[in-house]
Amino acid sequence: GRGELVFVGGAHPTRDVSLGRFDAILARLRAHPRVRLLPPTSYDDYLSLLAEGGVALDLMARNAEREIAYTTRTVRY
């Protein structure tokens, strides 16, 4: 009964490359009382949000973009 999951993300603003694969999980997260969904945000706001939490998880599958973004995501976590 403690804590909160803050989910930051969403469909790409110009093209949803997920093709709806995450609709069901997003609906489940929206319905959960201990989950807060936030849209993609500026880098500075994102860093401030990370500083508030005790744990951060990157749920995206490994891909080329993730490899390039390693220093701005995983190291910041």
Image: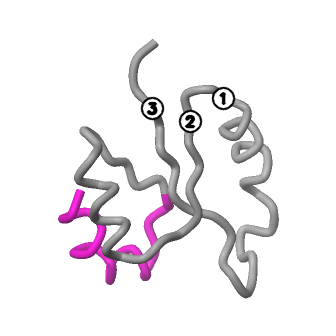
Q: Is residue 66 magenta?
A: yes
Closer to us: 62 or 3: 3
Q: CA distance from mark 1 to mark 3?
A: 10 Å
Q: Which residue is mark 3?
A: 4
Q: Is residue 35 left or right of residue 25?
A: left
- Residue drawn at the location 36% of the way across and 65% of the way down: 46
**Badge 3, how many Cα within 10 Å: few under 14, some, many 20+?**
few
Given the image, on which type of amino acid does mark 2 rest?
A: Val
Secondary element at tag 3 = loop
Q: Earlier in the sequence, mark 3 or mark 2?
A: 3
The image shows residue 20 at horizontal and vertical percentages of: 81, 62
Q: Earlier in the sequence, mark 1 or mark 3?
A: 3
The image shows residue 26 at horizontal and vertical percentages of: 70, 47
The image shows residue 63 at horizontal and vertical percentages of: 46, 74
Mark drawn on residue 46? none
| Residue 24, quarter of picture | top right
Given the image, on which type of amino acid does mark 1 rest?
A: His
